[in-house]
Amino acid sequence: MLLAIWVFVAGSGGISAAPYADYVIDARTGEVLHSQNADTRLHPASLTKMMTLYVAFEAIRNGEITLDTKVRISGHAASEPPSKLGLRSGQTIALRYLLRAAAVKSANDAATAIGEAISGSEAAFARRMNRTAKSMGMTRTTFKNAHGLTENGHLSTARDMTILGRHVIYDYPQYYNLFSRKTADAGVRQVSHTNRRLLEAYRGADGIKTGYTRAAGFNLVASAERGNERVIATVFGGKSTASRNARVAELLDLGFRKSPSRAPLRKPERPEYAGNTAEPGTAGKTIRVAGSVQKSLRPKARETAPVQIASVATTAQQDEAKLQAGIAAAMAAAADTIAPETAAPGTPRPEPRPTELALAETPVDSALQPAEQEIVTRVSTSGGQHWGINVGRYGSRYQAEKVLLRTALAEMATLEGSLRKVAQSSQGFDANFVGMTRETADLACRRLKARNVTCLMIGPS
């Protein structure tokens, strides 16, 4: 099993000596093994970027943005102080490179650009970070920015940051490789981890990255695994790199001594999806449908059909069972199509996950600098890839999302690359695929109708 260590770098700020705090848990169960001043609100520095990256992973998972989305760098992001990647205002760069820069180099300009790309502004993104933190049980944390540079009221605790680290481990294991890389291609240049000493010196650790501001001191959240045991240790307010690393090693050793060799794995409950829905007027960089398309009639859900894509079980349990069966059948039927797309030559691990491969090092094509995408509240009238299809209207968001997933798996040839979106209106929840060309939308609808599946094209209106 992979493991991860997170420590993030921030620029200096503030003048006060940093108070000390630490916290150690058994990552498998969440049991507290050691605690000192763990609930004292302190400056987290760039430990903040754990939440920035967590929200980015969440946005990717929910189709708000993709790893290949081209992000336009704002003047605000470009002007962030070091540590930074050196991005220029007006430049465009794929999101995958910003994630690498934020995780490996702890670049402040990259972190700000991530937040603006997802929520439209860093302030809106910080509010989304806070909603996510609250849902995780981080009760004493307040985020003001995406990078962690010292700001009045931007505070957290050793306990809360440990909670966040545990969520990253178990909620998004497919992104572990980001936090363990010693070097990474960040698009504009190769970046290196800020400090490899603990990684190289401590057995069981597979990633290290330090974090510092004058107000925070030397902070670190670290995770290591030995055999069946996994321990997370957090330190706030270290006096130096060397003394902080030594203290973290002591805490990890303490954790391994106290942890049982075998313990039940009780993963934390994934936090409620925060999204940008609570931010009226916010803008993002990906295509979203926030409401129903006003000039296009919607077919009602079919009661029965030979292909049961528009039919949903009356209970969540029954629907989930059918969904899993449908996924297994669809994936088996599409195995020949998926295999060549997800296989990466030279990848050392067998059967890599698609998202892991998506984050693997890829060459930069400097010629690919497309215009920035815009958030829309209805389908764009400009044509291009702003067409879509509707596969029915349903009584709940849950039903619509399940139908979208089933349809995507059943019609991968034409729907791959489109975005699954549920548009809520007073009449119900419309299940839509958006971000398609007119030709692709027309082909998808014809193929679905040939199997007696409800489908209606959504065109620019």
Image (cartoon, rainbow, N blue to C red):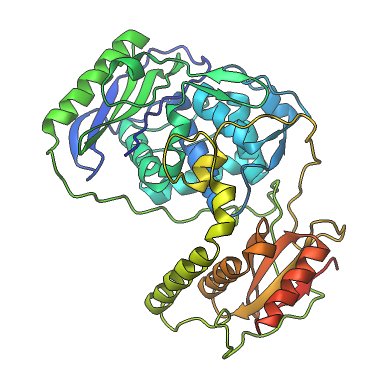
**202 over 350 or under it: above or below:** above
122 displayed left or right of 243 = right
The residue located at (48%, 72%) in the rendering is 326
Write the residue at 53% across / 41% down: 357
Q: Position of residue 209 (x, y in %)?
A: 43, 21
419 to 242, vertically: above or below: below
Name the one closer to the observer, 16 or 33: 33
Position of the C terminus by quadrant: bottom right
Q: Is residue 17 above or below residue 347?
A: above
Residue occupying image coordinates x 63% and y 37%: 95
- What is the quadrant of residue 384 in the picture? bottom right
Q: Position of residue 446 (x, y in %)?
A: 75, 76
Q: Which of the two residues, 262 or 288, is positioned nearer the viewer here?
A: 262
Residue 296, horizontal then vertical, whole percent:
79, 76
Q: How many numbered discs? A: 0
Q: Quadrant of residue 337?
A: bottom right
Left or right of residue 265, residue 292 in this image: right
> Split into 4 quadrants, where in the image is the N terminus?
top left
x and y, in percent, of residue 349 in the image: 42, 38
Image check: 410 left or right of 200? Answer: right
Q: Is residue 384 left or right of residue 141?
A: right
User: Does 7 sit above or below residue 239?
Assistant: below
| Foreground pick, 7 / 152 | 7
Q: Visible in this render: residue 290?
A: no
